[in-house]
Amino acid sequence: MDRLQAEINLFSSLHEKIKHLHAQNTQKALALSEVRNKLLGEVENLKKEMAQKEENANKMVESLKDDATQAFLAGFEMALEKATVVYPTMDLSALDPGKTVVDS
């Protein structure tokens, strides 16, 4: 009978430990889930922020390309005007900023 009571006490003790460990595991799982959800939210925010920054960078690149083109065209026109002054009889009408010299 004492042996049976000892086994019952051991079983009861182990059962309580299991319940306690299960409760701890549940709490840790909930905490982990909260951290995971928070991190997923942060990742989504960072993705949106990165997409916005990429869009802004692309707009800036396009703006800089436009500025460079305008500066090139203005410089080309200025060079034509100066060439006309230096060489008034030369026909510069064939010059075009879009033409490329190949194997000059």
Image: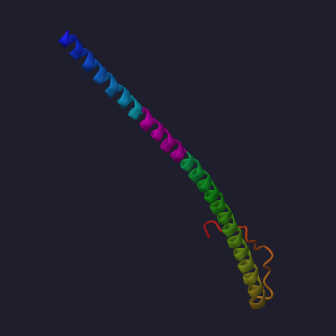
The boundaries of the magenta stretch are: 26-40
**In magenta stretch: residue 33:** yes
Viewer-proximal residue among 92 and 41:
41
Which of the 4 quarters of the picture holds residue 5? top left
Q: Is residue 7 left or right of residue 62?
A: left
Residue, x 63% and y 66% (percent of image)?
102
Determine whether 56 is above or below 7 in the image: below
Residue 45 x, y percent position in the rendering? 59, 51
Quadrant for the C terminus in the image: bottom right
Which residue of the protein is positioned furthest toward the top in this rendering? 1
Picture coordinates of residue 61, whole percent (x, y): 65, 64
Q: Quadrant of residue 12?
A: top left
Decide whether the magenta segment is chiefly helix, strand or loop: helix
Q: Residue furthest bottom?
A: 86
Please state which of residues 102 and 51 is positioned toward the viewer in this rendering: 51
Question: On the rendered image, what quadrant is the N terminus found in?
Answer: top left
Residue 46: percent from left, percent from top:
56, 53
